Image: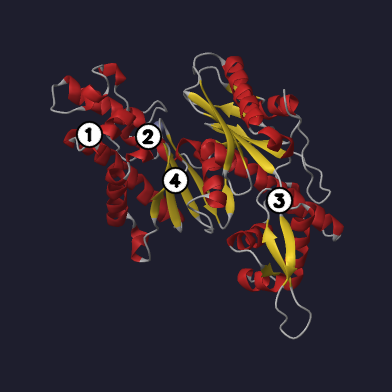
Amino acid sequence: MGYSVRPPRLAGGKANDTRILKSINVLAVLEVLRSASGLSRADIARATGLTPATVSSVVSILISAGIARETGLGESGGGRPPVLLEFNPDAFHIAGVDLGVSKVIAVVTNLEGQVVSRARLEIDAHAGPEAIVSRLLKATHTAFEAAGAVASRIAGIGLSVPGLIDAERGLSVFAPNIPGWANIHIVRRFRDEFGLPCWVENDARAMAIGEAMFGAARGYQNILCVNVGRGIGAGIIVSGEIYRGKQGGAGELGHMTVDPNGPMCPCGNHGCLEVMAAGPSIAAAAIRAVSTGASTRIRELAGGRIEGITAEVVSDAADQGDALAQGLIRESGRYLGIGIANAVNLLSPEIVVIGGGVARAGDILFDEVRSTVQKRAFTTMVNLPPIVPSDKGEDASSIGAAALVFEEMLAVGRITDLMRAGGTRADMNGP
Ligand SMILES: [Zn+2]
């Protein structure tokens, strides 16, 4: 391979894959630094509400990591002129790899989530775990090669996989729709291949982390991120912390019952949100309508082949004004709205971000989701959270996986800080 890999070290910290609670303070300082350049430590203290001592210690971690740098002196307010700081988004780079049912995507980004290089490979979900892992590794190698000189400055790799994960052990435990995929030591495989620190996260949670750090939910502390594609999953951020639940089982919004008499879901329940609103249900409803001779351009857009009808085709037809297609997208949006209204009642998020293939349906879908949530969510009496699309398209989970690396590196930075200060905190050892 035409690149070498050597992880940058943060503040002399030891990069490892121990899951650690992220540092809200570090992220708060970072958020302010990213919002404007030429800020002093005192400006940051005012903006974050942190004490000057905390800001100084956080800034020193960020400076030693190269993430923040001093740019000169500001205006003196009478005493010593303040040292001005700026964020350095190219201090190091991060990589994210996303496993989907039909494709894998690997990206290399800077610390603003800007994609430097990208590789996308089709996969056959039935090819078996070993073949799929080698496609994941290949896509990553391709993205690293395309990154050129930047590849030597990649700090780590985040892995986004569907289904259940065991973050502690770096395992992809189970992925629905990928036959035979069980207990894959995905982190070990990547670490052995690339010699970099690696982390794994569920795809919807990776998307939520990416939206929080680099996307539509930036600056919010309470976030619901919904991934609507072949399945439906949610990433939940509460008070700035990703919420995983017991054994990582949180966020299964797709299996919330929205119609007790609805069709059976592969999970065994009836009327799950996923069977009412996800991509395959949109496609199946379109195929039923086309088969009964309904007036629509859907078949034509599918190249005349009924088996070519997918949710994307329905979405394209809806875009072109096809009334039947628009009705199907609205129907999906209505059920999605019911599910999101229930989640809003439970969580009271500040913002809801919707990503995934179905989210590409745009305003037709979002208008229906918004009006349904407005009608059904109790907390709209207080305030209705904005419901917005992800702007990252199909890269949302891979960019989110890269964001996971950044987040984990910052957490490692905080540990060394606490160790230097002689402080010990039980929660720093992870769950
Ligand atoms: Zn289900």
Pick the front one: 197 or 122? 122
Pick the front one: 416 or 305? 305
Query: In the image, is residue 66 above or below residue 190?
Result: below
User: Do residues under tags 2 and 1 come within 8 Å of each other at their CB atoms?
Assistant: no
The picture places residue 31, in percent across and down from the top left corner, at: 61, 59
Mark 2 CB within 8 Å of ligand 1: yes
Label 2 sits on what residue type?
Glu
| Dot 1 or dot 3, earlier in sequence | 1
Secondary structure under tag 2 reads helix
| Dot 1 or dot 4, earlier in sequence | 1
Q: Is residue 283 left or right of residue 117?
A: left
Label 4 sits on what residue type?
Ser
| Dot 3 or dot 2, earlier in sequence | 2
Residue lying furthest top: 127
Secondary structure under tag 3 reads helix
The residue shown at (68%, 54%) is: 88
Q: Is residue 372 left or right of residue 105?
A: left
Marks 2/1: CA–CA distance: 19 Å
Q: Nearer the viewer, mark 3 or mark 2?
A: 3
Label 1 sits on what residue type?
Ala
| Dot 4 or dot 2, earlier in sequence | 2
Q: Residues within 10 Å of mark 3 (few under 14, many from 20)?
A: many
Q: Which residue is mark 1?
A: 325
Q: Which residue is mark 4?
A: 390
**In the rendered image, which quarter contains the C terminus?**
top right
Q: Which quadrant contains ligand 1?
A: top left
The residue shown at (73%, 81%) is: 76
Q: Which residue is mark 2?
A: 274
Mark 1 CB within 8 Å of ligand 1: no
Q: Residues within 10 Å of mark 4 (few under 14, many from 20)?
A: many
Label 3 sits on what residue type?
Leu
The residue shown at (52%, 58%) is: 220
